[in-house]
Image (spheres, helix red, strand yellow):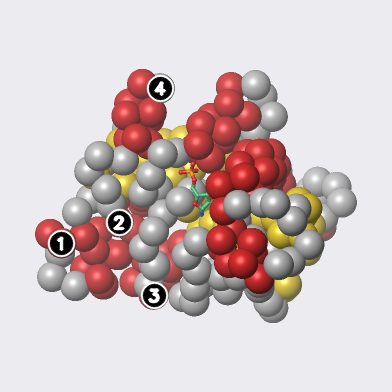
Amino acid sequence: MSVVHTPSGRKMRLAVLASGRGSNFEAICRSVDEGRLQAEVVVVISDQKEAPVLSKAGIRGIKNLYINPADYESRDACDVAMAHICQEAGADLIVLAGYMRLLGKSFLRHFRWRTVNIHPALLPAFPGLRAQRQAVEYGVRFSGCTVHFVDEGMDTGPIILQAVVPVHFDDTEDTLTERILREEHRLYPQALQLIATGRVEVVGRKVRIRKQLETADTR
Ligand code: GRF
């Protein structure tokens, strides 16, 4: 059993890893601004030099870095460097928000059950790339999004929260993506707030959400 603990008296510190536009990053920041998420983003890291998420972080005055995986001799070396940056920034939790690379043992060793991801499907259905297209092509009636802990697999870690959206007959990849994204922006901050308040624990491959805050005595 494992719970992410944030030292009391300060906000949970988030390191956001993202490869693209950063709409989930923005949703997380809005939740922080509006007091719905007791956290702060301490660093944003991207593997894409031109990723819009980096400039979005810059506008907000958040430290942002481009890490080029090709600069490292192996995936392991890159993972070690990333973990080091996150540790230096004092991150409690690593938040993958459209990060398109798999993280390996060398990274997760430092952030086991302290790394989360959002996936645009109801896992374990449609893992991997273009999950919305997979759902439309399969003809499922419902899809959605999943916030989960990250393990070494592709979208395989213990599930924290899921939200369901309908899939319509005429949906395209784009229309379904838009409908799911609205739910992502609600669900991800909600999951992060549950973690920030110490209510999430990993039990085997399942996640228990505690109903109420527990004190140090009962943990
Ligand atoms: C989202 O659909 C998320 O579920 C997936 O990547 C996309 C990132 O979008 N993992 P954005 O960069 O947060 O807008």
Q: Amino acid at mark 3?
A: Lys
**Residue at the spot x=74%, y=56% of the render?**
169
Residue where numbered disc 2 is placed: 82
> Residue 10 location in percent, x, y?
57, 34
**Mark toward the start of the polypeptide (4 vs 1):** 4
Mark sitting on residue 70: 1
Determine crowd level at label 2: few under 14, some 14-19, many 20+ residues with C-alpha closer than 10 A.
Answer: some
Q: Is residue 95 left or right of residue 61?
A: right
User: Depth check: 215 or 16 in front?
Assistant: 16
> Residue 180 location in percent, x, y?
65, 47
Relative to 189, does residue 125 appear above or below in the rendering?
below
Q: Is residue 151 left or right of residue 204?
A: left
Q: Amino acid at mark 4?
A: Arg
Mark sitting on residue 182: none
Number of disc labels: 4
- SS at badge 2: helix
Q: Mark 4 and mark 1: span between their CA atoms? A: 28 Å
Q: Mark 4 and mark 3: span between their CA atoms? A: 32 Å
Residue where numbered disc 4 is placed: 60
Q: Is residue 140 left or right of residue 53?
A: right
> Residue 82 location in percent, x, y?
30, 56
- SS at badge 4: loop
- SS at badge 3: helix
Residue where numbered disc 3 is placed: 105
**Mark toward the start of the polypeptide (4 vs 2):** 4
Q: CB of mark 3 within 8 Å of CB of mark 2?
A: no
Say if residue 2 shows up in the picture.
no
Quadrant location of the C terminus in the rendered image: bottom right
Determine crowd level at label 3: few under 14, some 14-19, many 20+ residues with C-alpha closer than 10 A.
Answer: some
